[in-house]
Each structure stands twice: as C-alpha cells, then as structure tokens.
Image: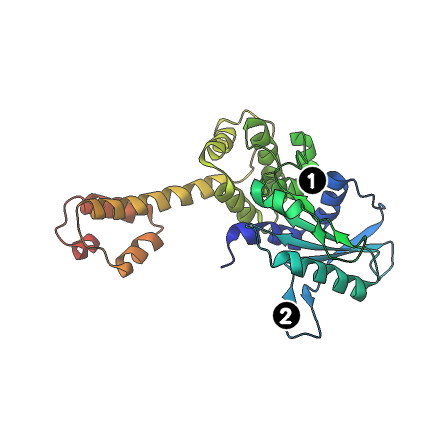
Amino acid sequence: MVSAKHEGPIQIIRDNPEVVAQLLTTAFQIELSKDLVIRTASEEFTNIAPTAYRADNVIEICEGDSARPSMAVVVEVQQRQDPAKRRSWPVYLTTLRARTRCPCYLLVICPERPVAKWARESIKIGHPGFDLQPLVVGPGVGPLVATPEQAARTPEMTIVGTLANVTTPDREAMEITHAALVTIENAGHENADLYTDLVLNALPKAARRILEELVNTGIVDYEFKSDLFLRSQAKGKVRGEAESVLKVLDARGLSVSDEVRKQVLACTDQEQLDQWLVRAITVEHVDQLFG
C-alpha cells in the first residue's frame, strides 16, 4: 500500500520540480546551466513485453527556450529493499533515454539507512562497462542545507532532505527545517499545511518536540505568520484525546465495535471528546457513551 511517507517527497517534487535540479547540484555536484525550464513529464514507460513499468516521478530539464530536454531524471522513493527494483530501474533509464534522446539520471530517495546503503550498490547489467550506479538521497548524503538562511532560499529541497533523513534530526537540523516550513507557509503555498503534516508525521518524537519548542518559544528568527503549526498541533491533540477515550473503554473491559472506534477517531470536536472521555470512565455499556 502506498503511504504518506512514500508519497510525501514525490508530492513536493511534483509541486516544485526544480527541487530535483537542486538535489543534483547540491548532493552530487552535477553541473547545470542557470537558464533552465524544469517540468514534470510522463511517468509511464511502455515496453513490448506485457509488463507495465511506472516510475514515481520523471522530471525533464530544458535549457533556454528549447522544448527538447537536455537532461531527464527518474525519481523514486524507496522505503524497503526490493530486488525487483534493481531490474526495473535500468528499464526506466534506457526507455527514458530512448524517448528523450538526452542524458538520463536515476535519483532514489531512501529515508532508512539500510535501504539507502542497498540502493547505492551498483547494478550489474552484464555488458562490460554497462553498470548503473543510482544517485541516492538519504542518510549519509547530507547535510544538504547548513543554515536556516539557506533553508529559506531552498525550502522545498530542505523539506525533502528532512523526509529523507539526510542528517540526524537534532536541534540544529530542526532549526533549519523550521525555517523552511515558515518560508513556505508565509509565501502562501497552497500545500503548506500538507508539507507541515508530512514533516510532523515523519519526525521521531524527540525531534518533533524540538520543532514544537522552536515554534512556541519564538527564539529563532523565522516565525509563522498564521496559525498553521498550531492547527497541526491541535489536530494531534484531538487525535490523542480520541485514542484516550478508546483506551479507557478497553481498560474497563468494555466491548468496542469497529463502528464505534471509527466514530470516535473521526470526531474533531474537542468539547465532544471531553464529554466522551468523562463518560468512558463511568458507562456500563459502550452505547451509553453517546448519550
């Protein structure tokens, strides 16, 4: 099943394909000209065989006014070791090269260290000199961004780096991530809420607490102009209280149906959840929870 952790970096790249060019130059020192048009292209790869091939994302980079790409990049998010990918990735690149007639690269985003190590291994095609070395963004490649000021200039790449765990999520890293989130939110980006949720869901608890502290104390130069982060915190609090209602019922040995669990978890009314939590302590039957 496709997860938010898988789709998060891809969504950011679809929204901002220039992130791919930034990653190529920052992480892998691939030189690009300044006058570029960067666009998302078809992710489908046709083949004579009946097997269907589809990449997570394909980006084309064009120079100047040219409509033809001078470079194309296949972007994949990989959360586990999958031997089948080592067979399909070469197909992606060779098919894309035939379609675009330009140099093609494979960029793999791997948040987990063992997966990143696996993905970096050269893929032996068999023909002499015809090996594929994936470009991997993940633990071991960072830091991509060293200061909050750099994060404010390249916020989307900074967030992709955070989701890819390129550096240990300590206080310094969270200050950089915080600057990126603030920059995007204050620019009025339509997916600012989504990006914040992606980061909050991906961070370990300790890192999330650091990020929340940076917002609440206001001790850094970058501040949210709206209540974006507070709304994200509020959603987490509501979810936590809904789970508390169910935990109380379970602890008391009351039978809770799947329907009731869904109803409680779907509730976003803080006052209603407060009432349910109080009732959960005393009701004799779950049906009494709803009054």
Residue of label 1: 154
- Give the class, few, some or many, for how many residues have Cα within 10 Å of label 1's Cα (few <14, many ≥20): some
Question: Picture quarter containing residue 184?
Answer: top right
Q: Earlier in the sequence, mark 2 or mark 1?
A: 2
In the image: residue 180, left or right of residue 245: right
Amino acid on which disc 1 is placed: Thr
Closest to the observer: 59 or 262? 59
In the image: residue 28, left or right of residue 213: right
Give the residue drawn at x 53%, y 27%: 218
Question: Picture quarter containing residue 171?
Answer: top right
Callout count: 2
**Image position, residue 16 (x, y; %):** 68, 51
Distance of label 2 from label 1 (alpha carbons): 35 Å
Marks 2 & 1, CB-CB < 8 Å contact? no
Q: Residue furthest left?
A: 284
Q: Residue furthest right?
A: 65
**Image position, residue 186 (x, y; %):** 61, 41
Give the residue drawn at x 62%, y 46%: 118
Is residue 271 visible in this depiction of the protein?
A: no
**Image position, residue 63 (x, y; %):** 85, 53
**Image position, residue 196 (x, y; %):** 53, 44
Residue of label 2: 52
* 30 up-or-down from 217: above or below: below
Give the residue drawn at x 59%, y 38%: 182
- Give the class, few, some or many, for how many residues have Cα within 10 Å of label 2's Cα (few <14, many ≥20): few
* 253 up-or-down from 52: above or below: above
Q: For numbered disc 2, what is the local secondary structure? A: loop
* 28 up-or-down from 132: above or below: above
Closest to the observer: 134 or 173? 134
